[in-house]
Image (spheres, grey):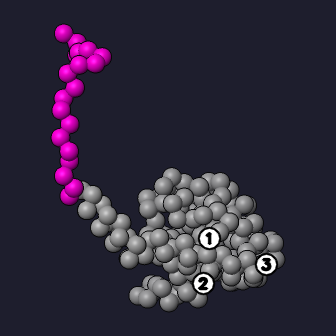
Amino acid sequence: MRDDLFNIPSLKSCLRNQLTSNIDHRNNDEAITKINKAIKKYHLENKVNIKEYVADVGAVQRKAQIYALASVMEGFNLSLMEATSNGMFGVTYDVNYGPNELVVYGENGYIVTFNDTEMMAKKFVELFNNPDLLQEMSTKSYELSERYSEKNVWKAWKRLLTDANKPVEYVPEITHGIGDQRKK
């Protein structure tokens, strides 16, 4: 079982560093059994709260601070994008694609070496022990997420569609110069 998929070892490290905040964990039903085993393994029953599904994710995210992502691999992570657009900032592993596109290190989150649960925990502790930094990064999350706003994405699509509809100038075939390079 890979406990690190659910940030449980990082949470345990936070507690060793006297972090007293409770952690709310949301995940799908399929993962709950594994999460509960990891919570028991690290004796976090009184610190980790497994929450039910909510329809208004944005309302929950606007009350939260950190979006922890411990994926093995990602595409473009919509849940991380949604979290940053609601003022949360990401603490995530360095995996291909998604998180690296969304998290600007030190501005709206941190990207830590894959599987480095201790470093992830250090980032949690650093943030929770520094309320000014928490606020600064939250504000920056709102700002940086604007690049993916409906308005800005639509502008990018319109530019692409306009460019795609431009006539292509005819370029005649090159018949001289370096000679015929085809094998005969």
Q: Nearer the viewer, mark 1 or mark 2?
A: 1
* Label 1 SS: loop
First in residue order: circle 3 vs circle 2 = 2
Query: In the image, 81: left or right of 18?
Result: left
Quarter of the C terminus within the rendering: top left
In front here: 161 or 137?
161
Residue beneath the point at 73% across and 61% down: 118
Q: CA distance from mark 1 to mark 2?
A: 14 Å
Q: Which residue is mark 1?
A: 108
Residue type at tag 2: Ala
First in residue order: circle 1 vs circle 2 = 2
Query: In the image, 139: left or right of 85?
Result: right
Residue beneath the point at 22% across and 55% down: 166
Instruction: Identify whether 176 is placed above or below 163.
Output: above
Q: Which mark is residue 129?
A: 3
Q: CA distance from mark 3 to mark 1?
A: 17 Å
Place of residue 38 in the rendered image (x, y in percent of width and height, measured from the top left): 62, 68
On the question of residue 83 being in view, the answer is no
Q: Which residue is mark 2?
A: 64
Query: In the image, 16: left or right of 10?
Result: right
For mark 1, does the 10 Å Cα neighbourhood hold few (<14), some (14 to 19), or many (20 or more) residues? Answer: many
Residue type at tag 3: Asn
Residue beneath the point at 41% across and 88% down: 55
Place of residue 11 in the rendered image (x, y in percent of width and height, measured from the top left): 69, 71
Magenta region: 165-184
Q: Is residue 166 magenta?
A: yes
